[in-house]
Amino acid sequence: MLYFRRFVWFIAKTMVLICVLAGMLVCGFFMAMNVSNIYVVLNDGMEKRVDVILTRQQAEELNKYFHADFLIQDTALEGAINGDSVYTNYNITGFEYSLTIEKLWAWPWDTYANCTVVERVPSISGSVISSRRTGSNQSVPKWQGGRYDITLVKTGGLWKIIGMQQKTILVEPDDAGEELETEILLP
């Protein structure tokens, strides 16, 4: 009877250990899946946002990455679409985009995720629109990047950006030679 009790206890401990390990693996898999999906949404969505602000084209594609509540409140997008952007007088032909994700965490059971990113557009190529050459500067204005706290929400199985708060402003260096960026902290 003693051996039978030991055998049953061994089987029970082994089953509990296997269940705990399987639970950890499943939890890790779903965490990795959420983080990778969020990473793609952040990179593609933020780059598309800059593209729409600079070129004012294909704004409907932003619905893939951003929640409708965010799109209504984004003043930079609103200015670009209404023609109030500093890039309205320019024909933008290309830009270099950089997004660095500093902090990202999403539990498998959560429908919200928070992250911190640094957005930069080191170079923008383009020219002044010919009908507006007299009143505009000939060089394309530098992009005002920054460090953002971004909130994402999972709706219908898809992650979308629902909030974005700028924490610092990153001013790109001049073409003249200054190589370090200037960081301005926001309140």
Image (cartoon, rainbow, N blue to C red):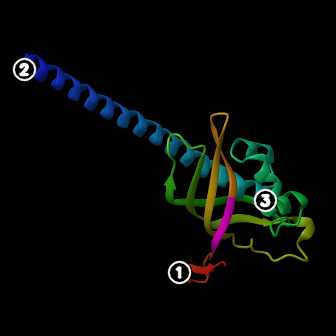
Judge whether 60 appears above or below 151 on screen. above
Q: Nearer the viewer, residue 113 or 91?
A: 113
Amino acid found under the numbered disc labelled 2: Leu
Q: Is residue 88 magenta?
A: no
Q: Which residue is mark 3?
A: 74
Q: Nearer the viewer, residue 138 or 67?
A: 67
User: Tag 2, which secondary structure?
Assistant: helix
Q: Give me the residue at 47% from left, 37% from top.
A: 30
Q: Nearer the viewer, residue 147 or 139?
A: 147
Q: Which residue is mark 1?
A: 180
In which quadrant will I find the N terminus? top left
* Residue 175 visible in the snapshot: no
Image-based side of 176 in relation to 11, left or right: right
Furthest toward the front, the residue is 1
Q: Residues within 10 Å of mark 3 (few under 14, many from 20)?
A: few
Q: Which residue is mark 2?
A: 2
Dot in front, 3 or 2: 2
Give residue 48's position: percent from left, percent from top. 69, 51
Judge whether 86 appears above or below 2 on screen. below
Magenta stretch: helix, strand or loop mostly: strand
Q: Give me the residue at 89% from left, 62% from top.
A: 83
Amino acid found under the numbered disc labelled 3: Asp
Q: Is residue 167 magenta?
A: yes
Give residue 171's position: percent from left, percent from top. 63, 77
Report which quarter residue 77 is drawn in: bottom right
Q: Which residues are magenta?
A: 164-168
**Dot 1 or dot 2, earlier in sequence:** 2
